[in-house]
């Protein structure tokens, strides 16, 4: 049985919707920024893995080049944009939410006090990417 990467989107949506209700075992409220950073991470990986599986199935894998798998996935969609104009759109959207995920995972300052907005935007863009891929 293969894992359905859309389940990561469901987790992101749940965390985002219930951020104020989440608490630790001690009953302390879970940090809102930490929750929104996690939402960004899960939403990105939902889109990334759906896109990565699509590329493996359709093209046999990522294009060669510099960078890791994330950058090469975006590059793969750009390489094949003549085949389907939506591939360029997917590449652009994936690049944007990748930047959000990197900020959420590694930057001390996260979107200058607007993590909720970034989380919502990343979730929406992730769903757009998944819908575009599903429609191809």
Image (tube, grey):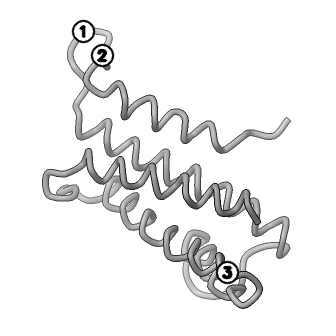
Name which quarter of the figure residue 86 lies in: bottom right
Marks 3 and 2, the one that precedes in the sequence: 2
The mark nearer the N terminus, 3 or 1, is: 1
List the residue tagged with mark 3: 76
Q: Mark 3 or mark 1, which is nearer to you?
A: 3
Task: Give the vertical position of 43 relative to 84 (above or below).
Answer: above
Residue 54, how many percent across, how many down? 76, 63
Screen quadrant of the N terminus: top right
The secondary structure type at the circle numbered 3 is helix
Q: Which of 115 and 60 is in front in this view?
A: 115
Q: Which of 118 and 27 is in front in this view?
A: 118
Instruction: Locate the C terminus by quadrant.
Output: bottom right
Quadrant of the rendered image containing residue 29: top left
In the image, residue 116 sits, relative to residue 93, either above or below, namely above
| Pointer 1 residue | 27
Q: How far apart are marks 3 and 1 (CA)?
A: 46 Å
Task: Give the residue at x 73% y 61%.
Answer: 135
Measuring from the top left, give residue 117's x and y in whole percent.
Answer: 27, 50
Residue, x 21% and y 15% (percent of image)?
28
Front in this rendered view, residue 134 or 29: 134
Is residue 96 toward the left or the right of residue 19 in the image? right
- Residue 85 - label: none
In this rendering, the answer to whether 56 lies above or below 121 is below
Q: Which residue is drawn at 41% across and 54% down?
A: 122
Label 3 crowding class (10 Å Cα cut-off): few <14, some 14-19, many 20+? many
Does 52 sit above or below residue 64? above
Q: Mark 2 = which residue?
A: 24
Q: Are marks 2 and 1 in contact (CB under 8 Å)?
A: yes
């Amino acid at each position: 049985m293969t894992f359905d990467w859309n389940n990561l989107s469901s987790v992101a949506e749940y965390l985002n919707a219930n951020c104020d209700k989440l608490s630790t075992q001690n009953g302390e409220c879970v940090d809102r920024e930490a929750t929104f950073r996690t939402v960004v991470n899960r939403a990105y990986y939902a889109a990334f893995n759906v896109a990565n599986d699509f590329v493996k199935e359709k093209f046999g894998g990522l294009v060669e080049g510099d960078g890791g798998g994330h950058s090469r996935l975006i590059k793969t969609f750009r390489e094949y944009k003549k085949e389907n104009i939506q591939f360029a759109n997917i590449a652009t959207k994936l690049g944007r939410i990748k930047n959000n995920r990197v900020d959420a995972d590694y930057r001390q300052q996260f979107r200058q006090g607007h993590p909720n907005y970034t989380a919502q935007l990343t979730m929406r863009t992730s769903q757009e990417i998944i819908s575009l891929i599903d429609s191809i």
